[in-house]
């Protein structure tokens, strides 16, 4: 078996580094072109806080939101704790989804306005749930 000289080894290392970079770019492009359904994750988050994040592959963050929701529900009131975790996980889901599946450098003012509206609506819904939960827990 022939020994490779240092120049050949360096060329092979450079080719392998280039191939790894191309694989990473292709994986990122595929992920951006074929993202999971945004609304599917929203529905999962509606059922269980953090489930949509787990569906995106952020298992640690999703499990953390589930644990936070359970702790708040058991320590305070399910009418207060669960909506808090629910709204917070929705807001976090929105930012994680954008980070994972929006192309880098994409500037879309309509998308930014939609994000602001979504966050505002989630906060309003959360406040309504909290106030309603507070009154329900006083019974």
Image (cartoon, rainbow, N blue to C red):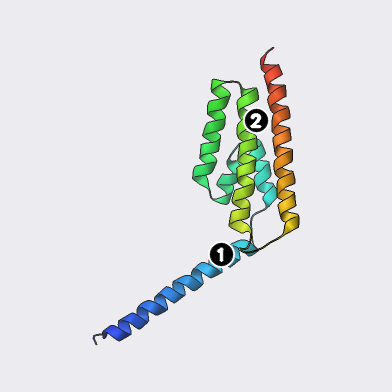
Placement of the N terminus among the 4 image quadrants: bottom left
The image shows residue 126 at horizontal and vertical percentages of 69, 32
Residue for badge 1? 28
Residue occupying image coordinates x 68% and y 20%: 134
Instruction: Tell me the crowding category of disc 1: few under 14, some 14 to 19, or many 20 or more residues within 10 angstroms, Cα based.
Output: some
Residue under the point 61% across and 37% down: 88
Q: Earlier in the sequence, mark 2 or mark 1?
A: 1
Q: Position of residue 17 (x, y in %)?
A: 41, 74
Residue underneath mark 2: 83
Q: Quick check: 135 left or right of 10? A: right
Camera-nearest residue between 116 and 47: 116
What is the quadrant of residue 83 in the picture?
Answer: top right
Q: Secondary structure at mark 2?
A: helix
Q: Are marks 2 and 1 in contact (CB under 8 Å)?
A: no
Quote the CA–CA distance across marks 2 and 1: 34 Å
- Residue at position x 57%, y 31% from top? 69
Q: Check the image and report above or below for 9 versus 34.
A: below
Which disc number belongs to residue 13? none
In percent of width and height, residue 3 lies at 23, 85
Q: In this rendering, is residue 65 above or below 107? A: above
Count up the numbered dots: 2
- Under circle 1, the secondary element is helix
Residue 29: percent from the left, percent from the top? Answer: 59, 67
Image quarter where the C terminus lies is top right
Q: Residue at x 64, y 61 (%)?
A: 34
Task: Characterize the local packing of mark 2: few (<14), some (14-19) or many (20 or more) Cα atoms within 10 angstroms.
Answer: many
- Residue 49 vs 33, above or below: the answer is above
Report the front residue among 115 and 75.
115
């Amino acid at each position: 078996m022939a020994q490779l000289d240092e120049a050949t080894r360096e060329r092979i290392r450079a080719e392998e580094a280039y191939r790894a970079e191309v694989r990473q770019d292709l994986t990122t492009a595929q992920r951006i072109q074929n993202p999971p359904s945004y609304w599917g994750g929203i529905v999962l988050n509606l059922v269980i806080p953090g489930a949509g994040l787990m569906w995106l592959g952020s298992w640690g963050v999703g499990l953390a939101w589930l644990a936070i929701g359970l702790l708040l529900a058991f320590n305070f009131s399910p009418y207060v704790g669960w909506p808090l975790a629910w709204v917070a996980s929705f807001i976090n889901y929105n930012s994680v989804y954008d980070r994972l599946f929006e192309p880098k450098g994409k500037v879309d003012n309509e998308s930014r306005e939609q994000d602001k509206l979504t966050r505002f609506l989630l906060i309003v819904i959360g406040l309504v749930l909290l106030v309603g939960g507070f009154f329900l827990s006083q019974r």
